[in-house]
Image (cartoon, rainbow, N blue to C red):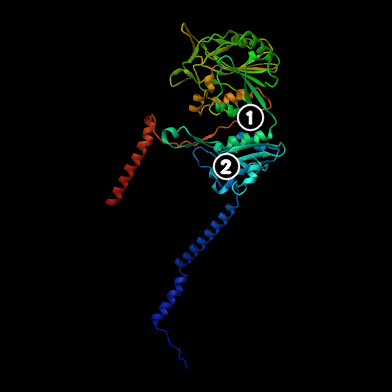
Amino acid sequence: MLKWKKKTPQEEKEKVSVKDRFQSVQSRKGTYSVAMAAVVIVIAVVINLIAGQLPDKVTQIDVSDKNIYGISSKSKKILKNLEQDIVFTVYADRSDTDERIKTFLDKYTALTDKITVEWVDPIAHPQQMQENDAQSDSIVVSCEETNKSVSVPFTDIIVSDYSSYYTTGSISESEFDADGQLTSAVNQVTSDVKKKIYRTSGHGEMTLSTSIEEELGKSNITTEELNLLMTKEMPSDCDMLLINAPSSDISEQEKTMLLDYMGNGGKVIYIMGDPMADTPNLDAFMEQYGMKKISGYIADMQRSYQGNYYYIFPQVSASGTLAQGLESDMVLMINSGGFVKMSDQRDTLTVENFLTTSEQAYAVTEEEQTQGEYVLGAVASENDAKLTVLASESMIDAQVTDYFSNLDNSTLFLNMVMNNFDDVENVSIKAKSLAVQFNTVQHAGAISSFLIFGVPGIVLVCGFAVWMKRRKA
């Protein structure tokens, strides 16, 4: 028979202590903390599960210094107005494709439900690639309704600079052009509008740079050379005529052809050549449309590049089509000529300036310097005819547009072209630079030096003083 054993006082004390321990304030706080931690973990898991189901355009944030995944307003407008269904067929192994291309594709196609993306592995499906005459590592943009397709190689999206190979032995990435290439392809497969520009020859004219030709091509505009002396009349498919910085004058016959062409509603862009060249027929052609050439090179004492008065930043007063896409409202013109608007214009003619010097400009010849405000760009309109005059070819010179890529030189010229057409939109979009950015101090002034060196120094001294004070305490 079991006997009840009376507990000792020590055992009773231990029993009460354990019971009280779980009912104490500290115990309740600990339980509450554990419960809250569990709730937070559950919430975090739920948020991650929800985030995993969100589209990339929501979850992926562009933190690149050049905003390479940014989509231009031009692209957004075209995608918003899309009426035809488009297919992006990517001939590449998705797992091996550059993450930048995949990310941009996701963001770009998320802006419209009219674009479908299909991935085709060229190794697994070589026959499909051959049937569509496609290349590996490319995106074929196609529209069944128009039966058109355009191929965009990956090398046109991530552009490499091969010039460094000869100096460093390596090839570096220079540009990311996904926005421009894809929007151009979409525009080409959906638009039936094509324009043709004829470039005059036979007078020492300058050629257009490769980059300008490519940008025109993005808007379905092609160019072809034309010698006016070798034709009896202007070609019927001439949507616009470009006279690009001739070094010699045109003939009387050519001037007559130009005036007849303009009389029938023609469109001409005339880029002046050497300001000191003797060009009486071209000058007379300008004067027929209210613009008079000024002899000499133009120097601007107020709007010049680093004190070089012949490197001019004209005042930009463009509006309408001419102003579209201008970001800095600054263009650079070097060794430019100039002209003025004539006062005795006929009532049917209007001349609007879009590039002018300041009032502190001078027309400089060997004999004299004449102060005044000069025109460097203007558009003359009469009925359906338009004559656009630009005072210097330097505005679209490749050395200028490449070195000063942050200026609006190329954009303004393309707008000059588009201003002649009511049914063509400038879809030229600047590529994003992939050049490495270095944080360097250049020409730091007193304030800059204080912020860069002074403030950190003060913080270090104060921190050391506080540390010493607490150490002695």
Three-letter code for the amino acid on which mark 2 is drawn:
Asp
Q: Nearer the viewer, mark 1 or mark 2?
A: 2
Q: Is residue 361 above or below residue 56?
A: above
**Direction from residue 405 to residue 443 in the image, left or right:** left
- Give the image quarter of residue 439: top left
182 and 251: which is toward the camera = 251
Q: Is residue 461 above or below residue 285?
A: below
**Is residue 446 visible to us here?**
yes
Three-letter code for the amino acid on which mark 1 is drawn:
Ser
Q: CA distance from mark 1 to mark 2?
A: 24 Å
Q: Residue 137 — which label?
A: 2
Q: Give the residue drawn at x 54%, y 45%.
A: 99
Other-residue count near label 2 (Cα within 10 Å), few / some / many at <14 / 14–19 / ≥20? some
Q: Give the residue drawn at x 47%, y 36%.
A: 435
Residue 452 image position (x, y, % from top left):
38, 36
Q: Give the residue drawn at x 31%, y 48%.
A: 467
Q: Is residue 205 above or below residue 68?
A: above
Other-residue count near label 1 (Cα within 10 Å), few / some / many at <14 / 14–19 / ≥20? many
40 and 347: which is toward the camera = 347
**Is residue 360 visible to us here?**
no
**Direction from residue 189 to residue 22 in the image, left or right:** left
The mark that comes first in sequence, 1 or 2, is 2
307 and 173: which is toward the camera = 173
Q: Secondary structure at mark 2?
A: loop
Q: Are marks 1 and 2 in contact (CB under 8 Å)?
A: no
Q: Secondary structure at mark 1?
A: loop
Q: Residue 219 — which label?
A: 1
Which residue is outermost to the bottom? 1
Residue 67 image position (x, y, % from top left):
52, 38
- Give the image quarter of residue 17: bottom left
